[in-house]
Amino acid sequence: MVTHAIIPAAGLGTRVLPASKAIPKEMFPIPHRFGDKYMLYPMIHLIFDTLYNVGIRNFCFVISPSKERIMEYFKPDQEFIDTLIDLGKEDEAEVLKEFYNRLSRCKIGFRVQEKPLGVGDAVLRGKEFVGNNSFMISMGDDLILGDGDNVYRELIDIFVSREVDGVVLVKEVEDPRHYGVVIGKKMTDSLYKVEKIIEKPKTPVSHLAILGIYVLKPWIFDVMEGMIGNRDWELTDAVDEMAKRGEMLAYKVDNVHRIDIGRVETYIDLFKDIKL
């Protein structure tokens, strides 16, 4: 079992300003069904639920000093639930009751990234929390919905059954310039052995785009610490180095409902197919 996760949520959100100045982008509202109607869930809530559904019980959120609202959201508020019930908002109260019940079964930790030093630095701050456990990374602005639980579970199953050092989730895209991409040797229709990872290539050397979801062994922290002070580095640099030293697989998914709130265009796209 993989029971630990690090959720990087410290980025400035410069591509979704000015809204991200007022609200952490990880708290942007996402329409999501509850029963026969839609409600607006903060993105970070849906990420938590998805990871919880696949067995994660230890969550480390890495935030910036200006994102204390995320910490506040993860504090149970029974008084607010009582107010909702008094107002006849039973469904809304039920959503929060279930959320708080799940929180009570988990270990929740927060780490603060004082300066915007990148995702790699953010993940490294979760080292003590993770300890010697293998763990999942799930970016705070990226999520697979619909079959998401199955995708995350399959990622973990591949990691465990193949006894590899890491698995990264990828999807074929037309324009890979906004993503880290995987160059690898095809093993099956959905599995690749990772040979190299390139962050945001200017020319399309590969169309296998990383979706920001990984399962990794904890020795990647040693790789990260070896990169400190040498140059600017990203998480993908550490994963690339891990692939060179060990065995890293890429799991390719198709036809999944992906939510990416990191850019205005992709945030708008998630509303287009909703029929109220």
Image (cartoon, rainbow, N blue to C red):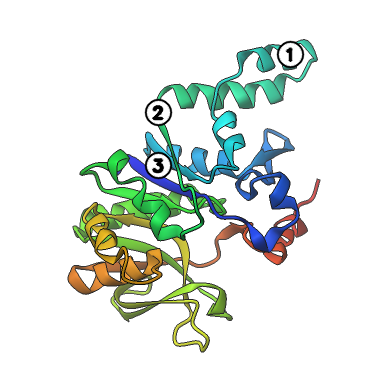
Sooner in the amino-acid sequence: mark 1 or mark 2: 1
| Image coordinates for residue 124, horizontal then vertical, percent | 34, 52
Q: Which residue matches tag 2?
A: 106
Q: Which mark is residue 169?
A: none
Instruction: Assign the C terminus to one quadrant of the image.
Output: top right
Indicate left or right for 96 with 150 as reference: right
Q: Which residue matches tag 1?
A: 83
Label 1 is placed on what type of residue?
Thr
Foreground: disc 2 or disc 3:
2
Q: Which mark is residue 54?
A: 3
272 or 73: nearer the eye? Answer: 73
Residue at 40%, 70% in the rendered image:
232
Mark 1 to mark 3: distance in Å? 32 Å
31 or 266: nearer the eye? Answer: 266
Indicate left or right for 259 with 202 as reference: right
Residue at 60%, 55% in the rendered image:
12
Label 2 is placed on what type of residue?
Cys
